[in-house]
Amino acid sequence: MGQSTYQYSPPTSEKFMDIILPVFIGVGPSMDCSAVCKLPGTAAIIALCSGVFQTGMTLPGWAAGTWLIIFIAGFDQWLAFLLLVFIS
């Protein structure tokens, strides 16, 4: 397999979108919970907890992705192919 030309660079202030974009992606699905929050009682509490969880899980995913790219950059296209074959 050929060598990848990807060069890893840790996030800096110039790459602010590398951090803010996953936050916005997490906030989007958590807005679904706002519709449930209009219900009275414990449904609102469950919806709020679910929304906070959905928003917060994007940051660990982003951190794991930036760490894993160092190791899988050489064969990432094959990994994506195999995952898509497995899913379908």
Image: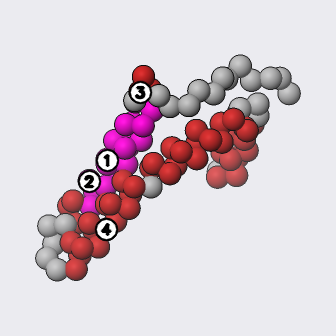
In space, the residues marked 3 and 4 are separated at their CA atoms by: 31 Å
Q: Secondary structure at mark 2?
A: loop
For label 3, the SS is: helix
The segment highlighted magenta reads: 17-33
Q: Residue at x 22, y 66 (%)?
A: 36
- Inter-mark Cα distance, 2 to 3: 28 Å
From the viewer's side, name the closer residue of 85 and 60. Answer: 60
Magenta span contains residue 32: yes
Residue 75: image location, x then y, percent: 76, 34
The kind of residue on which mark 1 rests is Gly
Callout count: 4
Distance from Cα at disc 4 to Cα at disc 2? 12 Å
Disc nearest the viewer among 2 and 3: 3
Above or below, 30 relative to 14: below
Residue assigned mark 1: 28
Q: Tell me which label, 2 or 3, sits earlier in the chain.
A: 3
Q: What residue did someone put label 3 on?
A: 13
Q: Position of residue 43 (x, y in %)?
A: 23, 76
Q: Secondary structure at mark 4?
A: helix
Question: Is mark 2 in CB contact (under 8 Å) with mark 1?
Answer: yes
Q: Quadrant of the N terminus?
A: top right
- Please state which of residues 47 and 5 is positioned toward the viewer in this rendering: 5
**Precedes in sequence: disc 4 or disc 2:** 2
Up-down: is 24 above or below 86? above
Looking at the image, which residue is at 31% across and 60% down? 51
Given contact means CB atoms under 8 Å apart, are the residues at marks 4 and 1 in contact?
no
Identify the disc placed on residue 49: 4
Which residue position holds label 2? 31
Q: Quadrant of residue 19?
A: top left
- Cα gap from disc 2 to disc 1, whole angstroms: 5 Å
